[in-house]
């Protein structure tokens, strides 16, 4: 509020200005907004996990490439063994658990 803006507003018994009392509508309550944002966060984590699992299969699959001289060569984008694919897929878990621990620690402070 700017200076002098409250001078013309009547006060109620509690000493508060009734015209400045902001009430959220039912569909705009803060808890519903927070619940919706938490849902979007969980959805984002799920999509990231599924996307990584699908993408790693596509990056390791073999496909044919026809060269300019007509030769057909079988190639793939990445030649990862199962240990390397497991390490890449576990990166989601390590990132997830580290942010959960950091967030819990910051929340308790």
Image (cartoon, helix red, strand yellow):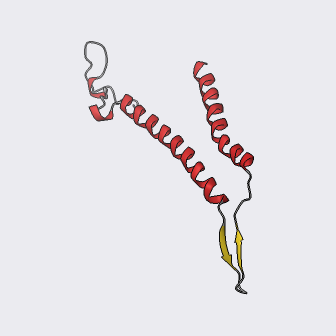
Quadrant of the image for the N terminus? Answer: top left
Name the one closer to the observer, 10 or 73: 73
Q: Is residue 104 visible?
A: yes
Please determine whether, in this image, residue 52 is positioned above or below residue 13. Answer: below
Residue 83 x/y as whole percent: 74, 45
Residue drawn 63% across the image and 41% down it: 92
Q: Nearer the viewer, residue 7 or 89?
A: 89
Residue 55, image quadrant: bottom right
Residue ranking furthest to the top: 13
Answer left or right for 56 relative to 38: right
Residue 23: image location, x then y, percent: 29, 28
Count of numbered badges drawn on the protein: 0
Q: Is residue 2 visible?
A: no
| Image quadrant in which the C terminus is located | top right
For the point 27% across and 31% down, the residue is 26
Q: Kindly indicate the quadrant of the structure image that contains residue 5.
A: top left
Left or right, 41 with reference to 14? right
Position in image of residue 30 (x %, y %) = 38, 30
Percent coordinates x, y for residue 90 in the rendering = 67, 40
Is 51 placed above or below 16 here?
below
Residue at horizontal 63%, vertical 26%?
Answer: 101
Query: Front-most of 14 and 44?
Result: 44
Q: Residue at x 67, y 75 (%)?
A: 65
Name the residue furthest bottom: 69
């Amino acid at each position: 509020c700017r200076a002098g803006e409250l001078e013309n507003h009547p006060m109620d018994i509690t000493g508060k200005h009734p015209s400045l009392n902001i009430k959220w509508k039912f569909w705009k309550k803060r808890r519903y907004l927070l619940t919706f944002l938490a849902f979007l966060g969980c959805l984002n984590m799920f999509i990231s996990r599924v996307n990584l699992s699908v993408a790693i299969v596509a990056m390791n699959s073999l496909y044919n490439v026809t060269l300019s001289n007509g030769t057909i060569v079988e190639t793939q984008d990445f030649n990862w063994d199962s240990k390397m694919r497991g390490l890449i897929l576990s990166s989601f878990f390590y990132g997830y658990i580290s942010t959960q621990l950091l967030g819990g620690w910051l929340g308790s402070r």
